[in-house]
Amino acid sequence: MKRINSFYKKHEKTSFLLLISIFILLIVSLCLSATAQERLNGIVLGVDGKPLEGITIRSNKGTTTVSSNEGEFSLPLGMGRHKISFSRLNTIELDTVISIPFNGMFKVTLALDDRQLQTVEVSTGYQRLPKERATGSFAQVSGKMLAEQVATDIIGRLEGMVSGYSVDRKSNGGGGYGIIIRGISTLRGIRAPLIVLDNFPYEGDINNINPNDIESVTILKDAAAASIWGARAGNGVVVITSKKAKFNAPLKVSFSGSFKVTDQPDLFYQNKIGVGDFIDVENYLFDQGYYNNVETAADKFALSEVVELRIAARDGRLSAQETARQMDLLRGYDLRSDLNQYVFSKATAQQYSLGLSGGSAKRNWLVSFGADRNTGSLGNPFNRYSLKAEQNIKVTNKLMLGGSLMLTHSLTGRGREDVSGLNTSTGSLPPYTRLSDGDGNPLAVMRDYRASYLANVGGGNLLDWQYFPLEDYKSVTGANRVNAVLASFRAGYQLMDWLKLTASYQFEQQDSQNNTNYLEGSYFTRNLVNLFSTVDANGIFKRNIPSGTIRDRGLSLLTAHNGRGQVDINKTFGRHSIVGLAGAEIRSTAVDGENKRVYGVNESTLTSGVVDYVNAYRTFINGANAFVPNVDSFSGSISRFVSLFANAAYTYDERYTVSLSGRRDASNLFGLATNDKWNPLFSSGLAWNISREKFYKSALLPLLKLRMTFGASGNTDPKGSAATSIIFSSINSPYTQSPYAIFNNFNNPELKWERIYMFNAGLDFGFKGDRIKGSVEVFRKKSIDLLALNPIDLTAGIGYTVVKNSGSIQGDGLDLEINTINTTGKFLWSSDFFFNYYKDKVVKNYMGAFNGRGLVAGNLSSAGIVGYPLFSMFSYKWAGLDPKTGDPQGTQAGVVNKNYSSLIGTSLRLEDMVYHGSALPVFSGALGNSFSYGRFNASIRLSYKLGYYFRKPSLSYTSLFVGRNGNGAFASRWQKPGDESFTDVPSMVYPASSSRDEFYFGSEVNVLKGDHIRLQYINIGFDILGHNTKNKFLSQANIFIVASNLGIIWRENREHIDPDFAAIPDPKSIAIGFKTNL
Amino acid sequence: MKKYYYIILPLLLALASCKKFLEEKSDSSIALAETLADQQSLLDHYQVLNQADGNAAEISSTDFYLTDTDFLSRLENERNMYTWQRTNIFLPEINEWGNNYRAVYRANSVIENLGKIQRNTANTSQWDNVSGQAHYYRAKNILKTLFVWAPAYDAASAAQDLGVPLRTGSDFNVPSVRASVEEGYSQVISDLKVSIRQLPPVAVHVMRPSRAAAFGLLARTLVTMRRYSEAYLYADSSLQLKSSLMDFNTLNAAATLPIPQFNVEVLHDSYFTGVPLSNVRAKTDPQLFTQYELNDLRRTVFFNDNKNGTYGFKGSYEGFTTFFAGVAVDEVLLIRAECLARLNRLPEALADLNKLLRNRYKRNTFIDRNSSNQDAVIDMVLNERRKELLMRGLRWADVKRLNKEGAGISLTRTVNGKTYVLVPNSSGFVLPIPESVIEISGMQQNP
């Protein structure tokens, strides 16, 4: 009960007090003048008047500094005249002479603009550092590139935009968004990388973030880059940096908008069994007596129209002629056509964003508003409104305060019902199901019980028991509403010119409320009310669930507090420079939830009914004892982390850099002593800026830098704790009225943390004028003590799998990234290309016996076979169809046979299987081209995935008979001797053999190459103002049109399958939009 | 330098309080199973302990049959089990063997956890009750496993006969080893004796074991071992605690499911399910059905007339289409009757038998059975045993046991014109252990 009370309290305790205090601090602006003594304070600006950051300022006495992200610098100098140089990427942009003392700010304008510097600085969430000083591996997507696509969310659109990042839509394993950075490092833990928004991990729904607020995204790929995030960085880190206000910037107002239309999903993409073929199958099964039991069962399960026609004909209620006529009518229907016509529509999305920002020397601010209004392909709405406000104040020369606030409100509504996924009591809906009679009248479709039974049951006491999909969704109302708050506060104090203290705090709250109201007329409500209607011995009819709305309400409240204290040092003395940080962090994330159902709500009087959860009722149809469904539950979880971290990089003469980083995390993972929870991780790195060497004198290749890192990161399996724990069912046992529990976790003292080691070596290069620049990196990743679900002897009593440290994998990869400026002048053409190679293999396997059958299960299954990739594509050897029967045949120990239990069974050996290759792409990458000519600009992006295999959907007779799920390959099945010369599809047999189906599914004939090239998007823009900047209102105005998800332009497989999608691929979309600046 | 203390001091304080900060439970619904209430909540998980009994024994028995059409419409492993095949009769991941040992693990965990909970004057009755329940469930599940995967108990060879693994701890890293049949039954008996000492005479609900149920289960164990005099004692003890019988005259035989769940005869409730056993498919063995006399109410209470000369079973004590596999008064009464008959205490045996049948026959039609021939009385009791206890998963063990007594019962099935036969005392009466278990554990498979 304590939990429940605190849950309510948390709801009441609003965060506004906190927010107000942040704003009061923000508004305090103290102006204390700074005096310069023996220092040169200044600011570096670009040709466009914007501050430039990352410019190296060096005096002839050897003192050096780098301009900050506001373009500011402070260089210690002695009294007298000094020669100072301003350089970038080792190219001296400006030399000047200055006398100290110098009063005021020294303003320098360089012939550069900040766009050229855009990718120079990378953010780790703890620090921003110039990429040229970094030893680690970073990849960055600029805001400009992100803006080439129109999207409601940010994460899904990063694929093909950044090196080393891919999305696996099929397995989507381990939660998250299917994101894979440099291969999969964990088997069982969360595969998704850590997502950091500005400084702190983002716990909420990524859809809360307005993509227009994002400045750039940085991917931290190797151990040195990511190790500062410690145990959560094993899968890589995605750092999202939001747009920041700048000092000394004039008022800027920008407004943009877009409208996107997405095609209906292509329902005919999947190769499904033809309607005629399906009806033939049902007739065949009827002749075999397959439906006899269903027909006579007390459950009155739904029978399809074809079966009902055959029953009527058999019982003499329908003439043979009429039966044939009606059967022929059914052959003319197709559920997918009805779905296209009545259920699906084009999806639309509107997005608007208004941004204001400005900054004086002491203060800067930014406010942005975003609005999204989407309608999905089922007419389901999604609306989101967001507000972001930020302010930074230099209270004194040494003290800077900053705060930001992000508020999001979103609403996800309900739409029409896609019945193609409906599970009736006897499988999917038959493909000839009609939703409408063609005159606009909705039709009832089969669902739980036989139509002929429902027509006569209940003697008028029951509610109508039919299900009309085209109408029913109107009786189910409600929406999921999310309110999210993200507030942060920072205080930075420059204790000494080389020592800065920062304290930051972030508060995050996401409050979601999911309402579903099943109105009295909805099938859901009518079905439950009817099922729990009883007739007693005296024939008295009674409803044990009152009719009226069934109202489900789910509440969930996420609250996260993050606090961080950090010391930054940045000291240059002579040729030596040290940059480093150390700090401590404390995090707490609590999620509380509540689900509540109320029966019999009267919407107009807001009264509710009462149901009895304690006593079982004999349900109406088969008299089974059942309890009124009780879904009320509470949940609460809290995760806590305490971390200590430090890193330091020492650079000598801007040529050699050594970096070191370490981190220890502790968390409240259940059941361990505090001491055992600390998990230390480290990394180290070296960089050699060859182009700074005296001997290096290449005007053609002014940048050449070699870097190398090695380090460890970890993965925490949220359930991998070393204690047996139990978890209580949220509902008491209806029998003993007492709580009951299941085992949540089994004590295994042998468990160890997963550890991932990565070695990375990279070469950065830049040709003169940045015409060609890029990097090539090679890496080796070794993941040891991987936790995996291993098969265990059922006799142990804990199921068929157990979490164990199961083995080690080692992967080698190469990331190549090249940016080129192909033409300059009036026609500007630039390209970016990247190529990623990654292949891993299992080097150690602690798993038990070989389980060949497990290797072919599902789409993507991990194989623990030494020497093969972790995700390998294996299949059963195929020996063709039996020319006499059309049975699939396999080979075992060289002998062709049809003993399926043995072909897929325990006697199967690796030698009897076919290894095709990796099940994940070995090569992937993208090519982007941007053009501009006069006021037009265009960009086009291709992405590719190569060197992998997938298993295509295949025909299973068991699934066809039992679940009505048929594959279109049915049409080309073996039917008579000789057919085996052109088909691999087995003959239809009755009864279906599940092991025969399973063998065929897993055989080599169903494995295809996944290689493909995809056209991601084409963006065409037009600059309305052009060079005419005299416009009074606008400084910039662009319009654009983007076409996305344009599909595959080349694929290896000839069956027109998109290997990236398990079902229907994302449909094409087209968007138009504008961007203006005042 | 003094000002640094203002920074360092709070930092140190913060780290010092870390330990407490990190000791918060990460999920409110998770517990370490440390309290007595936690143990009870493990034992109240009815889906695992009461609703997951196995059907292999019943599918392998011949009190029912499937038509060829219905046989063919079943899944491959069910067809294999029905025709006594030796491979692919259990699914690899979730099956009866695993369910039995899942319950054993749960019982073992509770017994281990109890070792860490002080038994004192304040909690004695609850402590004993929980311990008794855990021992009951461990015994029950090992017994079920022995029925299916071990040969019938034979005192002469039990010490050598290969039984089933006896797991007594929760460490799942301990390899599984098959114990002898003798060791298996010994453990069942000793666990049940512990539970008899500790359980309350009646439980708050028949979903929980009680002393009466433990007496009954021990009687079932001993009668299967053919230790009739002991079985008599425990059956008698059980009946002294509870001996109420339903009068079938009070039931509505026309109902789809005439017998209510948790009725007065139930001592401990558990059930199994099985698609092939559902009465829309499974037809009662006609030779069995003809043995019910016309005045025997079980003809209509137990059976659904399919109106085509076949009958389906609807007499489950679950009041539903699932099959009762718990312990009930009628079984215990029949055990006592059989033991008395075998001990040649015929009048007492007949009294028990007549008591049961009076409640099964139409009112005032039943004429008390009488005989002074011991074999005749034994046969009478055994015949009624088969008629009363069908579709409870008991017939399989009965056939094995009675063949040891020399009954010579062969089981026969005909499917698609092909006849399958299990001859008495053959190895076919011991089912093969699921292949997945053999493969991982390396235990010896049954021949």
Image (spheres, helix red, strand yellow):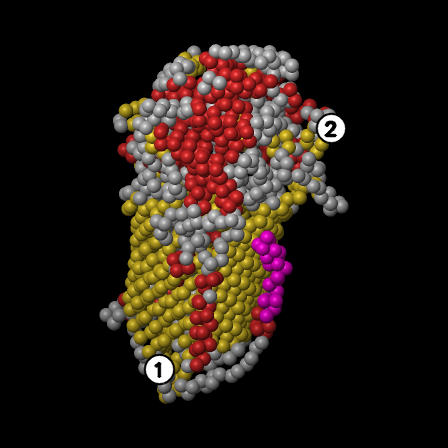
Nearer the observer, A144 or A175: A175
* Dot 1 amino acid type: Lys
Q: Residue at x 45, y 19 (%)?
A: B343
Where residue B281 appears, x then y in whole percent?
52, 20
Q: Is residue A532 visible?
A: yes
The image quadrant where one finds the C terminus of chain A is bottom right
State which mark lies toward you, 1 or 2. Answer: 2
Residue A415, position as x, y percentages in the image? 62, 42
Residue A5: image location, x then y, percent: 61, 55
Q: At 55% across and 31% down in the image, what residue appears?
A: B241
Residue hosting label 1: A83
Q: What chain does mark 1 sit on?
A: A
Q: Residues within 10 Å of mark 1 (few under 14, many from 20)?
A: few
- Residue closest to the eye, B163 or A354: B163
> Residue shown at 41%/79% (left/top)?
A497
Q: Which mark is residue A980?
A: none
State the extent of the magenta-drawn residues as a range: A1-21
